[in-house]
Amino acid sequence: MSAITISDNDWKRVKIKLQRKYNHLRDDELQYSAGREEELISRLEKLVDRDRDYVIFTLKKALVNIDNNRL
């Protein structure tokens, strides 16, 4: 089981936040569908050159403040 759950609707907003923070991330690199969180986390680890805990922390932070544009 994944450490985090992201719906498709929430992902649209989280993706925008990630692209603002890491402006080198492209849409094709950030493809995601609900239930594939582990795949997303692994991919983001490589793309942003951070460890798993940091990626999960960043995603959780984005979800908690989903209505806020900041990450």
Image (cartoon, grey):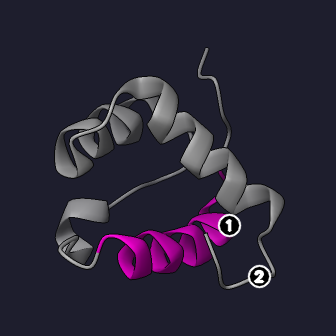
Q: Which mark is residue 36?
A: none
Q: Which residue is tagged 2?
A: 68
Horizontal arrangement in the rendering, residue 62 relative to residue 23 (left or right): right
In which quadrant will I find the C terminus? bottom right
Viewer-proximal residue among 61 and 41: 61
Q: Position of residue 63 (x, y in %)?
A: 73, 58
Q: Position of residue 12 (x, y in %)?
A: 55, 75
Q: Quadrant of residue 23?
A: bottom left
Q: CA distance from mark 1 to mark 2?
A: 12 Å
Horizontal arrangement in the rendering, residue 71 relative to residue 28 (left or right): right
- All told, the count of numbered labels is 2
Q: Please rate how many residues cluster around mark 1, counting C-alpha atoms within 10 Å: few if below 14, some from 14 to 19, many from 20.
A: some
In which quadrant will I find the N terminus? top right
**Is residue 15 part of the magenta span, yes or no?**
yes
Residue type, label 2: Asn
Give the magenta-colored segment's residue range. Answer: 6-22
Q: Quadrant of residue 22?
A: bottom left
Q: Which mark is residue 10?
A: 1
**First reached walking from the N terminus: tag 1 or tag 2:** 1
Q: Position of residue 57 (x, y in %)?
A: 60, 39
Q: At 60% across and 63% down in the image, what residue appears?
A: 8
Viewer-proximal residue among 63 and 1: 63
